[in-house]
Amino acid sequence: MSGRNTSPANRVLVLNSGSSSVKYQLLDMADRSRLAVGLVERIGEESSRLVHTPADGERRERRAPMGDHGAALTAVAAELAADGMGLDSPRLAAIGHRVVHGGKRFTAPTVIDEEVLAEIERLVPVAPLHNPANLTGIRTARALNPELPQVAVFDTAFHTTMPEHASRYAIDVETADAHRVRRYGFHGTSHAYVSRETARLLGRDPAETNVIVLHLGNGASASAVRGGECADTSMGLTPLEGLVMGTRSGDIDPAVVFHLSRVAGMSTDEVDELLNKRSGLVGLCGDNDMREIVRRRDEGDARAKLAFDIYVHRLRKYIGAYTAVLGRVDAVAFTAGVGENSAPVRQAAIEGLEGLGLGLDTELNSERCDRARLVSPQYARVAVAVVPTDEELEIAAQTYALVRS
């Protein structure tokens, strides 16, 4: 392949390693295009599956047992190599890893070394569901190509600009500090990307724009972004706090935990499972697919209607609260699966908030579109935007900027 060694190293592989899955994208940062996307799921099972789609080729699927992340990433590397884009390619500048929890220390993307790995390991107690899987992905990728720069991009980093009065809980300071109990926030790459893209949509400098971002997927979070920096966010020590989610309760009186322990005899693990896996929308009506909930509501299903109403009520509370936090709001931005695709949720969340300067154009809101757009009337003092998130591009951009510097 002539000229191969003289081509610039401008590609970044983004890895998002879960407990039994790996999502990946290969991006060319010269034009921010996607060269390949893929997913490995059911790692550790006989029914493991890899789906790989190169930008200029057909979707390929491989079904074979992959016993661990090492086998999964080896299979990913083989698929990329088959397209001439393997991990040994001189055009690959780095691998960017999504890491859920970076604590107080990691406020920016960080080149991974043994010290960084050790700190991510120390944070496992505050992110037991996520950081171990992230660590496995990092270690496996490093073993496949020890010379390639590996960068950690932290979900929590964007929220480290929160002031102490927003990030601390009102509990004994010494106890909180000894056990790292504070509000960290999550979905940071999405909130960073969407707040910046919303400012651009308005034709404004992000540093002079205040945005309330509503990241509404199966996991959901809100943030108050002042001049490009996070002033407050709804998730806390863990991703459980805040909005109603697919299977998580969001905000709840902490005494519920004690009550269930005393009255129902539930163990800590049982309450943990209840609040994280059997609550939220699925706990209220048995469904965590908003499309199905809206369909059931429209057909007169009382439980679906209640779930929808509770979900939207919590959204409206946070819009109001973050309006107070910011003082001046230029836009409310909806993003992620529900935020981008559910016109009924957007309508119900904004309706009746004219006193806050908000309004919705019903026709614009009902249009299906995959680009960033405004769905508010021109006269509205506060814009309402729908902005597709792109966490992978954000991770790739932060990774590439770091290794280039």
Image (tube, rainbow, N blue to C red):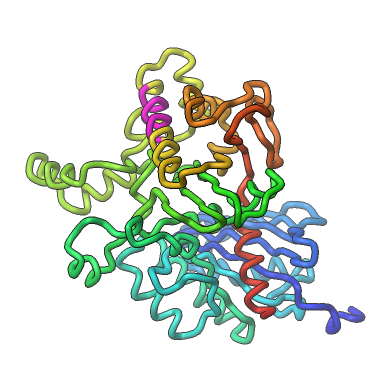
Q: Quarter holding the N terminus?
A: bottom right
The percent coordinates of residue 383 (x first, y second) are 61, 36
The percent coordinates of residue 85 (x first, y second) are 75, 71
Magenta span: helix, strand or loop, mainly?
helix
Query: Farthest residue toward the left?
Result: 262
Q: Is residue 51 visible?
A: yes
Q: Nearer the viewer, residue 84 or 7?
A: 7
Magenta residue check for 309? yes
Residue 376, image quadrant: top right
Up the image or down, 227 lies above or below 178; here it is: above
The percent coordinates of residue 132 (x first, y second) are 40, 68
Residue 156, image quadrant: bottom left
Up the image or down, 380 lies above or below 197; here it is: above
Magenta residue check for 155? no
Q: Locate residue 169 relative to residue 17 in the image: left or right.
A: left
Q: Nearer the viewer, residue 290 or 109?
A: 109
Residue 162, image quadrant: bottom left
Q: Locate residue 228 relative to residue 89 in the image: left or right.
A: left
Which range is magenta?
A: 306-314
